[in-house]
Image (tube, grey):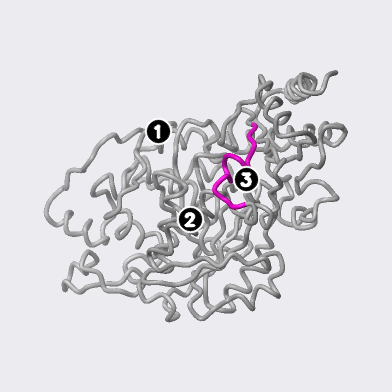
Amino acid sequence: MSNPVYKFDTLKIRAAYDPALHNQAVSPPIYQTAAYEFRDTKNADGLFALTDPGFLYTRVNNPTVDILERRVAALDGGSAALALASGMAAISYTFLTLAEGGGRILTGPYLYGGSADAFHKIFPKFGIHFDLSPNIDRPGDLEGDIKPDTKAIFVESVSNPTGAVADLEALAALAHKHGIPLVVDNTFATPYLLNPVKYGADIVVYSATKALNGHGNLIAGIIVEAGPEGAPPFPWDNGKFPQMEELQYVLRDRADNRKRSYLEAAPGGPFVTRIRLHYLNYFGAALGPFDAYLALIGIETLSERVQKQVSNAEKIIAYLEKNSHVAWVKHPSLPSDPYHKLAQKYLPRGAPGILSFGFKGTVEQSEAFLNAIELWSYHVNVGDARSLIVNSPKTTHGELTPEEQKLAGIEPNLIRLSLGLEDAEDLVADLDQAFAKVFGA
């Protein structure tokens, strides 16, 4: 009898151990230690040369963090992963590595406000510039925006907060045609709803703070590198990324003391290995073992949580569409949504439980509505077990100018909802009482 094929292979979560490095406790142990004892001088040499498996220092790697990295890489079909102290660290280290020494990243206007703000204010100081193209939804036109020093195309698989769905397959084909990687922020969708590697993505980043963990109790980020397990490895030796071929003093062959490049030392994950030994080692932003443990516990319930959030979103959308105080609703599950066809292709299990609607009323009435909410939590996280509500134009995307908000499809009256695990009827009742307090029964 052949082995079964699982719709969502939760066994990957449980099996992502290296038996040589970890005991196989049901709940992964927390290795709350700064450093590790070497067996002998030969073992120390091998660890520092990356020829022996093991752990050096928790700023660089840690057994609990390693389990998290292996599990997320397995879920995404990647060859390797790197866990960091925040989603912004994952994004920052990715682009510092891709465009090291100067270069451009091609992206669109549909971005998390913190990312867009950093792209505008911080990265140019490092010689890295972001081109926000209005053609991101039209890969044929986007090709004209690729410049000789463009190092990558970057998109959110499902955008924050408007739910724009990226055409990953077309964008990957375009990127690879020009010898550059496709980088996908898959925070909203998670590996349960969408696997970007299957559609050609080369690097996937997450704010694990959000739905991947799902309980609002940690800050974490993850970078996943595609490779032999999910897709052909990206040709980092194509001449556009000389930093990947540098001979490093920390990577030496134990036999003849010869320097090695990241491509030689870690053929299954050279990109994340370079970040680990270069930016993580020297800049920090390491994920602590206890936070890694919390993320591991959260991932155990990923499929059940996300599916309930998808279901709750459908019920809330049905309520909002009939509400006379709602001007519009944006969610790719709606047949009227411009991204509905892409959602059908890329999100067969359903679109993420995050949506936005237009409040029909004055600014003062909108604020009164938010202040009247009782069951929903008014704060800026998403993908939480709790249902969340926020006025994005003034909070998560308040860094953007009115022109940038308009280009991103963020209207001034936008309110973002992130569905949690509460009963959908209770959530509707809370919205109903808040609208009633503002407008009357």
**Which residue appears at 27% of the width and 60% of the height?**
50
Residue 62, horizontal then vertical, whole percent: 31, 44
Q: Residues within 10 Å of mark 2 (few under 14, many from 20)?
A: many
Highlighted magenta segment, given as a residue range? 389-401
From the viewer's perspective, is 329 left or right of 389?
Answer: right
Residue ID for mark 3: 192
Residue 55 rendering spot, x and y as whole percentages: 26, 48
- Reply above or below: 50 against 420: below
Q: Which residue is mark 2?
A: 224
Residue 242 left/right relative to 401? left
Q: Position of residue 338 (x, y in %)?
A: 79, 56
N-term mark: 1 or 3:
1
Distance between the alpha carbons at the discs numbered 3 and 2: 15 Å
Q: Is residue 262 left or right of residue 393?
A: left
Q: Which residue is mark 1?
A: 25
Other-residue count near label 1 (Cα within 10 Å), few / some / many at <14 / 14–19 / ≥20: few
Q: CA distance from mark 1 to mark 2?
A: 25 Å
Residue type at mark 1: give it: Ala
Is 359 on the left-hand or right-hand side of 183?
Answer: right
Q: Quadrant of the C terminus?
A: top right
